């Protein structure tokens, strides 16, 4: 069985780097007065912050990497499910702005989930 501490340390480092990079992007876009793009990046930042909190919650009480993986991945399903519904409703009613926002949220969550699974694979968690 893999080391839960390695998983925690590496994924938390990844999340912190993603958060810092996104904050830098927001700041740079604001300096260039590209406010709409900065606001879209803020949505990504919010998603990173949400799943960072969910990862910390998942780590509390997780005694092995398998329990941690199951708990954390469960949050992705619970949190993103309404986003898919909202996206479908926005598509149905032709609300392009809402579609874009939901797509950004979904895409960022999927990227975080994919990276987490890569770390799990490195320590052989099925």
Image: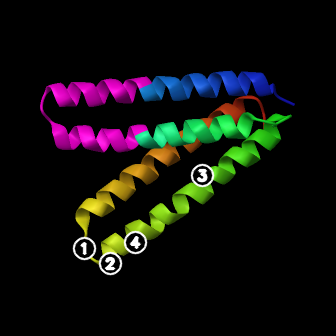
**Range covered by the magenta-colored residues:** 20-45
Q: Are marks 4 and 2 in contact (CB under 8 Å)?
A: yes
| Local secondary structure at mark 1 | loop
Comes first in the chain, label 3 or label 2 = 3
Q: Residues within 10 Å of mark 2 (few under 14, many from 20)?
A: few
Residue 56 on image: x %, y %: 66, 34
From mark 1 to mark 2, how far is it between C-alphas?
6 Å
Q: Secondary structure at mark 4?
A: helix
Cα distance, mark 4 to mark 3? 18 Å
Question: Residue visible at 37% across and 74% down?
Answer: 89
Judging by the rendered image, the residue that carries numbered circle 2 is 92
**Residue for badge 3:** 76
Q: Quadrant of the N terminus?
A: top right
Q: Which mark is residue 88?
A: 4
Mark 1 and mark 3 in contact? Answer it, CB < 8 Å: no
Depicted 113 relative to depicted 88: above or below = above
């Amino acid at each position: 069985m893999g080391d839960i501490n390695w998983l925690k340390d590496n994924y938390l480092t990844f999340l912190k780097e993603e958060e810092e990079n996104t904050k830098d992007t927001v700041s740079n876009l604001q300096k260039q007065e590209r406010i709409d793009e900065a606001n879209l990046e803020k949505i990504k930042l919010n998603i990173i912050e949400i799943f960072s909190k969910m990862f910390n919650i998942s780590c509390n009480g997780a005694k092995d990497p398998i329990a941690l993986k199951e708990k954390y991945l469960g949050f992705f399903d619970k949190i993103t499910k309404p986003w898919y519904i909202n996206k479908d409703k926005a598509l149905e009613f032709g609300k392009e702005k809402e579609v874009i926002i939901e797509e950004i949220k979904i895409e960022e969550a999927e990227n975080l989930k994919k990276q987490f699974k890569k770390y799990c694979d490195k320590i052989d968690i099925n």
